[in-house]
Image: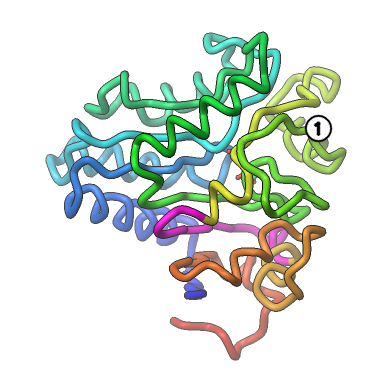
Amino acid sequence: MRIMVVKSYHEMSKKAANMVASQVVLKPDSIIGLATGETPLGMYDELVKMYTAGIVDFSEASTFNLDEYCGISKDNPQSYFYYMAKKLFDHININRNKINIPNGMAKDVEKECIEYDEKIKSAGGIDIQILGIGRNGHIGFNEPDIKFESRTHLVNLDEDTIIANSRFFDSIDEVPTKAISMGIKNIMHAEKIVLLANGVEKANAIYKTIKGKITPEVPASILQLHRDVVIMMDEDAASMIGDSIYED
Ligand code: F6R
């Protein structure tokens, strides 16, 4: 596990964007695993800037998003499909046929999950996976007590996640209670993982992820076993881990 503590959200976003861009420069047909939520917004801004400046070309890359809410259509502004279009895909030259996001409106969710796993496999697996982390230690929507061997599956969102995500909705009653999420196994199979965290509300989850025991109660703790994971955070998110593991 490589721990990087940076001064600001801006610095974290720039460094994460550089990691994604380097991956694509070195391997233009990279398979990129993407997250939504507030944390990667700055990274997406930076990637759009890098594309606009001609530094990176996404034309051969493919993407797989971690998750999507159930019961929300693609054109709903609350959907992760809509989020990805507005924050990244509409501004870069990604091939629309190479964008993959679970279909939250699928009639047969089990089939949708199996097909999503198959698509990841036939694409050759994920080269770089970007993750955020929930206050409860979730990655993707793999909530506490997840089975570590899970692949893409239907999730009942944790109460804490529903409360945390209600900030994006007009009222808490509008927050979907179910989602389709890649599983821990999909995430752990990625060649490289970059987990981003900022803000003091992530400090406890980060502490348990890095220094706690590996347990399904803290889904992100499994990352301790991954061979190439970078946990990059601002000083607030790092505030509980102590000086000993500060890298810079
Ligand atoms: C989103 C996702 C979630 C978020 C996490 C943190 O695709 O998979 O695990 O990364 O809930 O969300 P923010 O960044 O909004 O704090």
Q: Residue at x 64, y 58 (%)?
A: 199
Residue at mark 1: 156
- Locate residue 64: give its quadrant: top left
Q: Residue at x 63, y 50 (%)?
A: 184
Q: How is the image coloured?
A: rainbow
Residue ID at (62%, 41%): 151
Q: Is residue 217 magenta?
A: no
Q: Is residue 200 left or right of residue 61?
A: right
Estimate the x, y position of residue 144 in percent, counting from the top left: 80, 51
Residue 134 vertical position relative to residue 194 in the rendered view, above or below: above
Residue 197 % position (x, y):
58, 58
Q: Residue furthest bottom?
A: 244
Ligand 1 is found in the corner quadrant, namely top right
Residue 36 in the image: above or below residue 171? below
Q: Is residue 168 above or below residue 111?
A: below
Q: Residue furthest left?
A: 54
Q: Nearer the viewer, residue 17 or 208?
A: 208
Mark 1 burial class by Cα count in 10 Å: few <14, some 14-19, many 20+: some
Is the C terminus in the top left, top right, bottom left or bottom right quadrant?
bottom left
Q: Amino acid at mark 1?
A: Asn
Span shown in magenta? 189-203
Residue at horizontal 75 percent and vertical 33 percent from the top: 155
Q: Is residue 239 above or below residue 15?
A: below
